[in-house]
Image (cartoon, helix red, strand yellow):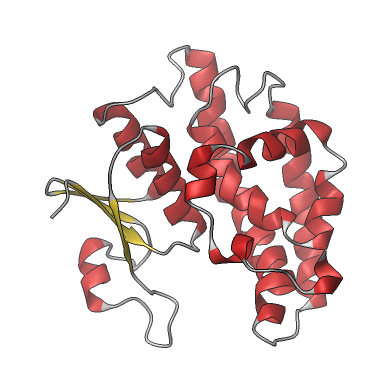
Amino acid sequence: MPEVNLYGLERSVYTRIARLALEEKSVAYVLHEVEIFGPDGAPQEQLTRHPFGRIPSLDHAGFWLYETGAITRYIDETLPGPRLQPSEPRLRARMNQVMSLLDAYAYRPMVWGVFVERVRIPMSGGKPDETKIAESMAVAATCLKALDALASAAPFLVGPHITLADLHALPILLYFSLAEEGRHLLAQYPTIEQWLAMMRSRPSVERTRSRYETKPLPKYYR
C-alpha cells in the first residue's frame, strides 16, 4: 500500500483541493474513488474513515485524517516540497480568511446552486432550477465582491506565492466559470478572472482535471 492514500472522487471539489496540495508538493499518492452520492449514500467503509460520510479522507502511513482544511494543512506541514502557507502572520491570517469565506459562503451557491443546476443536470438530460440559479447567483455576487476585496494582485490570492487559499478557491471558481452566468459575473472582476486563467495553466491543475473540464459542454453554454 502506498504511503499516501486519498479517498474521494475525481469530480469532487474538496477531493481536488487535497489533490492539488499533494500535486504542488510533488508527493506521490493514490486516489481511491469512493462514490458517496448514490441512492444508498456513503458506503460503510467510508463511514469508518469519516463518521459523516463525506470526502475526502487521508491515510498517511496509517495516520487517518478527514476535513479538507485539516488535510491540506497537514500535507503542507509534514510532507516535503514547497511551503503552501505563509510564515508572515498577516498573510497567513488572510489565507485562512479566504478559505473560511469559500467554505462558509461560496461553495454551496457557486457549485451546487449554479454549476450543478446549469451544467451538470442538463448534461444528464435534466432541467435546471432557474429560481435556485437566480438565488445562488445573488449570493455568488456577494462572495466574489468580498473575495476581490481581499485578493492580492501579486499574482496569487494572498501574495507573491501560491498558498492553500489558491488551492481552495480554484476548484470552486473553475466549476462556477463553466456556467454562462458564472463567466459573466467573473468578467466583472478582472483580478479574479486573471488569477483563474493563470491557475488553469499550472501542472497541478492540469493533472487533476475533472470529467466536466474534458467533456464538451452543450453548445448553448459555450
Q: Position of residue 196 (x, y in %)?
A: 69, 39
Q: Quadrant of the N terminus?
A: bottom left
Q: Does residue 106 show up?
A: no
Q: Quadrant of the C terminus?
A: bottom right
The residue positioned 71% from the left and 39% from the top of the image is: 197
- Compare residues 47 and 190 and report the one nearer the observer: 190
Q: Residue furthest top?
A: 88
Q: What's the residue at 20%, 67% (across, down)? A: 48
Residue 170 seen by the camera: yes
Q: Is residue 113 left or right of residue 135?
A: left
Q: Is residue 188 left or right of residue 41?
A: right
Q: Residue placed at 61% from the left, 63% from the top?
A: 214
Q: Position of residue 181 (x, y in %)?
A: 83, 59
Q: 47 or 199, which lies in front? A: 199
Q: Quadrant of residue 130?
A: bottom right
Q: Is residue 190 above or below residue 7?
A: above
Q: Is residue 150 left or right of residue 181?
A: left
Compared with 179, 41 (above or below) is below
